Amino acid sequence: MAHWLLKSEPGEFSWDDLVRDKTTGWSGVRNHQATNNMKAMKRGEHAFFYHSVDEKRIVGIVEVTKTYHPDPTDDEGKWGMVEVKALKPVPRPVTLAAIRAEPRLANLALVRQSRLSVVPVGDAEWELLCAMAGLAP
């Protein structure tokens, strides 16, 4: 089972918004590489929910509930989205600074391709980030 990281600007859609709404469509992604990552997602896979912009930190865990399908916010019909539900907040948010300071995370896509909103997370990276967040993997 693959793991992922989904970035959201908390001023646009935050962890608290997802908890309130229970589920959301991860719409509005307009980058080919991020879209290809969403196309690879399978139902039941987990992802970190990451607050970007000012916070730059992992704040929760989500589960993919619906695989890639058309994005209704795309008038041209060429982009898609997945749907996710909130699972749990992390006990200790993991900042980008802490991620960058950990040598074992040097190849994490979040570090190497910081502008992508949807990135894969390897198994070893997932376990390490869960430990940093105070979660059992």
Image (cartoon, rainbow, N blue to C red):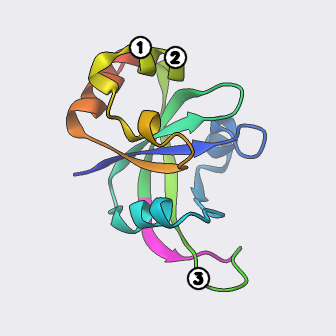
**Badge 2: few (under 14), some or many (20 or more) residues near its Cα, within 10 Å?**
few
Of residue 114 and residue 14, the one placed in the foreground of this image is 114
Secondary structure found at label 2: helix
Q: Quadrant of the C terminus?
A: top left
The answer to whether marks 3 and 1 mark residues whose Cβ atoms lie closer than 8 Å is: no
Would you say the magenta stretch is mainly helix, strand or loop? strand
Secondary structure found at label 1: helix
**Residue occupying image coordinates x 60% and y 27%:** 56
Earlier residue among tags 3 and 1:
3
Give residue 101's mark. Answer: 1
Q: Residue 106: horizontal and vertical position, in percent? A: 34, 27
The answer to whether marks 1 and 2 mark residues whose Cβ atoms lie closer than 8 Å is: yes
**Which one is in front in this view, the residue at disc 3 or the one at disc 1?**
1
Task: Quickly name the residue at label 3.
Answer: 78
Secondary structure found at label 3: loop
- Give the Cα distance between marks 3 and 1: 38 Å
Residue numbers of the magenta segment: 65-72
Inspect the image, locate mark 3, and give the three-letter code of the amino acid beneath it. Lys
- Is residue 90 covered in magenta? no
Q: Is residue 74 visible?
A: yes
Q: Is residue 134 visible?
A: no
Residue 70 position (above or below residue 27): below
Side (left or right) of 117 relative to 131: right
- Give the Cα distance between marks 2 and 3: 35 Å
Give residue 129's mark. Answer: none
- Is residue 69 covered in magenta? yes
Task: Quickly name the residue at label 2.
Answer: 97
Q: Residue 135: horizontal and vertical position, in percent? A: 34, 21
- Give the Cα distance between marks 1 and 2: 6 Å
Residue 54 position (above or below residue 119): above
**Residue occupying image coordinates x 47% and y 24%:** 90
Inspect the image, locate mark 2, and give the three-letter code of the amino acid beneath it. Ala
